[in-house]
Amino acid sequence: MATSAIDAIAQTIQLSVTPVFLLVATGSLLNVFTGRLARVVDRSRVLMDQWANTVGAEHDRIVAELRVVDRRIDIINNSIAAAVACGIVVCLLVALLFTQAFTGLNLNVAAAWVFVVATLLLLASLILFLIEVRLATRIVHVPMEALGLGAAGRRERKRRGQ
């Protein structure tokens, strides 16, 4: 193999390191997202068991939480889909880089756009994750009485907008 071809392959491997780090990060995020999804699904099963055995205000509380849990499941699934799409696009980017190295085609502009798309998909996934986390924390509020704060704690929570 000619020295220039070996140099081109070595340079391509160096160029593909950044996308591969993005792929590793995306895989780690997918691990977090699937863990959260499993916990939310478990919570939905507990709530469904309680739903069948409650009436009145308690039943209404269960129904309200089930609606939030259902929304959280949708958001997490969309976040997972965006992260998986990001991973696929990153793999496409690495393939483009090697195609350019082996064929001599100038695919720099295409590679740049593919990297932008991967980054936007990662951004969408992270935004959805943030929305899901905010939704999860909104439904879980520890009563002030349980914290020993009483009315003063309630006023402080209202002042902070919680």
Image (cartoon, helix red, strand yellow):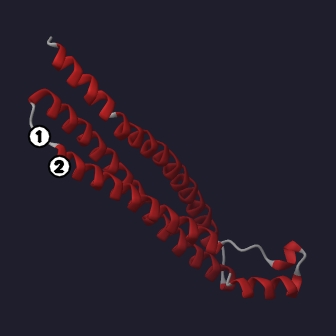
| 48 vs 69, nearest the viewer | 69
* Residue under the image location 17 percent in, 48 percent down: 110
User: Do residues under tags 1 and 2 come within 8 Å of each other at their CB atoms?
Assistant: yes
Question: Tag on residue 106?
Answer: 1
Q: Amino acid at mark 1?
A: Asn
For the residues marked 1 and 2, what is the alpha-carbon distance in whole angstroms? 8 Å
Q: Quadrant of residue 66?
A: bottom right
Farthest residue to the right: give it: 148
Mark 2 lies on residue: 109
Q: Amino acid at mark 2?
A: Val
Q: Quadrant of residue 53?
A: bottom right
* Residue under the image location 33 percent in, 30 percent down: 14
Question: Tag on residue 157?
Answer: none
Q: Is residue 100 above or below residue 57?
A: above
Label 2: how many residues lie within 10 Å, few (<14), some (14-19) or many (20+)?
A: few
* Residue under the image location 38 percent in, 52 percent down: 83
| 162 vs 68, nearest the viewer | 162
Describe residue 100's horizontal placement relative to residue 68 as left or right: left
Q: Quadrant of the C terminus?
A: bottom right
Q: Is residue 85 above or below residue 17?
A: below
Picture coordinates of residue 141 (x, y %)?
Answer: 71, 74
| 11 vs 71, nearest the viewer | 11
Picture coordinates of residue 135 (x, y %)?
Answer: 56, 71
Local SS, label 2: helix
Picture coordinates of residue 4 (x, y %)?
Answer: 17, 19
